[in-house]
Amino acid sequence: MTDAAADQATPGRWIPFEAGFNFRDLGGYPARDGTTVRWGRLYRADTLHRLSASDLSALRDLGLRTVVDLRAASEIDDFGRLDLDACPAPAWHHVPMLDVVVLRPNEAEEIDEPPAPTERSDPGAHYVELLGSGEAAVRVISLLAREGGLPAVFHCTAGRDRTGMVAAMVLELLGVPDDVIGHDYELTNEARSRSDAWIAQNEPEFAAYLARFSPDQRVTRGETILGFLAGLRARYGSVEQLLVDRGLRPVGLDRLRGRLLD
C-alpha cells in the first residue's frame, strides 16, 4: 500500500451509523494526472434496510440524489430495502448483479456474501464470472454519470463483493492506482465485527448462514479485487473498453470523471 493510500484511511472516510457498518466515502484517493477523488460525492455501503431513525436522518444530511441497490430481488423480499418514506429525496434504483441470493442456512442457490471457498491460485476469477456480460455494471455507472446523479451511494448486503466490484471499476476509471483500490477493498475487514454483532442479535438466520464459512473465507484480501481487475483487463483490455463496448458513451465517462475529480 502506498503512503497515499495509508493517509486516506482517515476519520471521515467512514460514515458512522447505528445499524450501517460499511458505509464509506470514496473521496480523497489519488487519481489520474495528479487529481484527487472528491469527498462527499460517491459512497459505497452495506445494506441500508437496517438503518435506524437517527441513521436515516444522518443519511438525509448527505444530500444523496441516487441510491443503487445491487442486491437480488430475493434479498429485498427477505430483508427489505431503504425506507423511502423516511428518506424520499434520493432516486432509488434496483440493479441486481445476481438473480437469486438466499441468505439462510442450507438454502443458498447462489452465494455472494461471503463468496465461495477461497481460491488463492486465481484470486478474483469468481468476480469476473459474477460480472457476467457486464450489463449491470454499465447500468450502475450510467446512473452515476447521468445529469444530477451525484451524490450517490451503491450497496449490496455486506458491502464487499458486488459493491467492491463496482467500486473497483469506478476507481479504475478515475485512474486510482491499483494498490489503493486493493486497500479500499480491504477496509471491509474493519466493519465485520460490528456487523456480525448486530446480525447475531437481529438477523439470526443470516447469522447462521454466515457461520457456515471459516474465518479465512471471510477475510477480505486486496489480491481478490486486483485479480478481478486483471481478469477484466485480460478479457476486455480495460474497464472503460468493457463499458464502451456495451453502449456506455465515452462522453458519459468523461462527465463522471469531471464530477468526481479535483
Image (cartoon, helix red, strand yellow):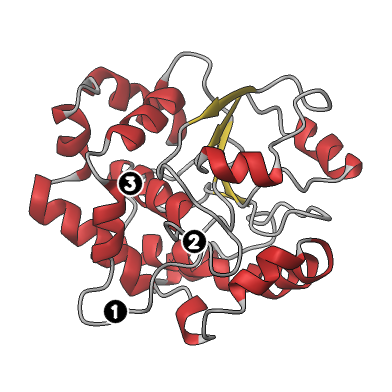
Q: Which residue is mark 2?
A: 108
Q: Residue at x 18, y 52 (%)?
A: 232
Query: Badge 3: few (under 14), some or many (20 or more) residues near its Cα, within 10 Å?
Result: many
Q: Residue at x 25, y 23 (%)?
A: 248
Q: Is residue 50 left or right of residue 209?
A: right
Residue type at numbered disc 3: Met
Q: Earlier in the sequence, mark 1 or mark 3?
A: 1
Q: Which residue is mark 1?
A: 119
Q: CA distance from mark 3 to mark 2?
A: 27 Å
Q: Nearer the viewer, residue 225 or 63?
A: 225
Residue 169: numbered disc:
3
Residue type at numbered disc 2: Ala
Q: Nearer the viewer, residue 38 or 25?
A: 25
Location of residue 51 (image quadrant): top right
Measuring from the top left, give residue 210's x and y in whole percent.
Answer: 60, 72
Q: Are marks 1 and 3 in contact (CB under 8 Å)?
A: no
Q: Earlier in the sequence, mark 3 or mark 2?
A: 2
Q: Residue at x 51, y 62 (%)?
A: 113
Measuring from the top left, give residue 91's x and y in whole percent.
Answer: 61, 20
